[in-house]
Image (cartoon, helix red, strand yellow):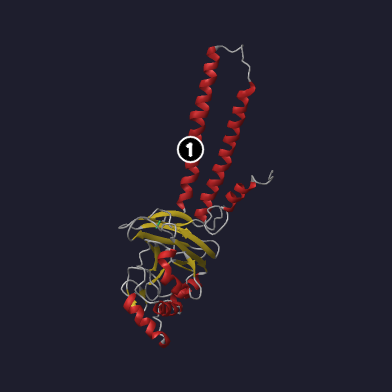
């Protein structure tokens, strides 16, 4: 039985890749737009080349010989095709692409400009993101797996890796750039529209490379300042969670920092985990009860992640720790 639209399925799947919060074909900043333009230009040009080749190929089926052409003529014509199609055309194509593509990368260079852009430091870990605002008023602000940036102005990202090489990539804004341990790489990106953008580690870094997603939010500068200010004062400990805090100090504090409670720096800073969009760097959506669920089953949700399984801690205790962490909302 014929299914007349069956051919459209792969096409639809292909086009579905053009939308979404990580599409390079839906640019939201100058650097990404230039790259997208080069991409469309290449697609158009190489479609032309493809069509021309198919036409030439069909032409060869025409059959028959040309008795009026001598062997010398044939050789000359062959040489012209090789010179034109094999050397001249690729040469011109490469020069044009370079002349177009190299300046497109300029936007991403952190060159000196009038007012120094905001600096955000991003550190890649297996398999999560550490995000630091070193110049925040009143002192550095640290968070994890979420990144807030001002809209309509360039931002300089200083990136590095804590363990292996990762890569920082916000497809709708431009990039990407390697995060190499022992080295700081810099890239300048700008979001021209407010909104949420997906980011993804773009260098294979181990078993959970795919589950290394970063939630990026662009908002007006004042809102970013307010967001940072809300994270400055250490929250006053809530009396109703005193017991959970004790459990946390016992089981979690060596690895995790919570402002005013613990100073661990092995795993993600949890000071504002209650307002994050996801858990486990994009593995599951944050919602009521999600943290306790994650604490119990994280090795099933994200196998091999660096946090040990908590089989030694009873469910009730994990429940209490999760309930308290959910209240950490600046
Ligand atoms: Cu980190 Cu791939």
Q: Nearer the viewer, residue 309 or 64?
A: 309
Q: In this view, does 218 lie to the left or right of 267?
A: right
Q: Where is residue 280 in the image (x, y as percent from the top left)?
A: 43, 66
Ligand 1 closer than 8 Å to label 1 CB: no
Image quarter (top left, top right, bottom left or bottom right) of the C terminus: bottom left
Q: In this view, does 20 lie to the left or right of 323?
A: right
Q: Position of residue 290 (x, y in %)?
A: 48, 72
The residue at the point 48 percent across, 65 percent down is 215
Residue 6's place in the image compared with 201, above or below, is above
Number of on-image labels: 1
Please identify the quarter of the rendering in which residue 61 is found: top right
Q: Nearer the viewer, residue 208 or 212?
A: 208
Please identify the quarter of the rendering in which residue 184 is found: bottom left
Which type of secondary structure does the marked residue at label 1 adopt? helix
Q: Name the residue under label 1.
A: 94
Image quarter (top left, top right, bottom left or bottom right) of the N terminus: top right
Residue 105's place in the image compared with 293, above or below, is above
| Residue situated furthest front in the rendering | 1
- Residue 119 visible here: no
Q: Where is residue 283 in the image (x, y as percent from the top left)?
A: 47, 64
Q: Where is residue 115 in the image (x, y as percent from the top left)?
A: 44, 64
Residue 164's place in the image compared with 256, above or below, is above
Rate crowding at label 1 as few (under 14), some (14 to 19) or many (20 or more) other CA atoms within 10 Å.
few
- Residue 175 visible here: yes
């Amino acid at each position: 039985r014929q299914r007349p639209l069956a051919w459209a399925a792969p096409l639809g799947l292909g086009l579905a890749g053009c939308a979404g919060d990580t599409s390079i074909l839906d640019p939201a900043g100058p650097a990404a737009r230039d790259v997208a333009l080069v991409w469309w230009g290449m697609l158009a040009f190489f479609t032309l080349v493809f069509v021309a080749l198919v036409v030439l190929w069909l032409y060869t089926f025409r059959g028959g010989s040309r008795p009026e052409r001598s062997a010398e003529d044939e050789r000359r014509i062959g040489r012209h095709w090789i010179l034109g199609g094999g050397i001249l055309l690729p040469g011109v194509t490469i020069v044009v692409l370079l002349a177009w593509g190299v300046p497109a990368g300029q936007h991403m260079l952190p060159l000196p400009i009038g007012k120094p852009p905001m600096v955000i430091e991003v550190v890649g870990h297996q398999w999560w993101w550490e995000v630091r605002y070193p110049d925040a008023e009143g002192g550095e602000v640290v968070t994890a797996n979420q990144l807030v940036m001002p809209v309509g102005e360039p931002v300089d990202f200083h990136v590095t890796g804590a363990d292996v090489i990762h890569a920082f990539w916000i497809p709708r804004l431009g990039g990407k750039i390697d995060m190499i341990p022992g080295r700081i790489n810099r890239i300048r990106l700008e979001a021209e529209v407010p909104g949420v953008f997906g980011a993804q580690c773009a260098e294979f870094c181990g078993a959970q490379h795919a589950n290394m997603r970063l939630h990026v939010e662009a908002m007006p500068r004042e809102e970013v300042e307010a967001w940072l200010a809300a994270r400055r004062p250490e929250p006053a400990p809530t009396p109703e969670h005193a017991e959970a805090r004790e459990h946390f100090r016992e089981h979690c504090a060596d690895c995790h920092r919570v402002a005013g409670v613990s100073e661990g720096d092995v795993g993600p800073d949890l000071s504002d985990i209650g307002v994050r969009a996801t858990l486990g760097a994009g593995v599951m959506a944050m919602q009521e009860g999600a943290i306790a669920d994650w604490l119990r089953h994280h090795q099933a949700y994200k196998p091999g992640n660096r946090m040990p399984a908590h089989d030694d801690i009873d469910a009730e205790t994990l429940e209490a720790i999760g309930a308290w962490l959910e209240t950490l909302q600046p």
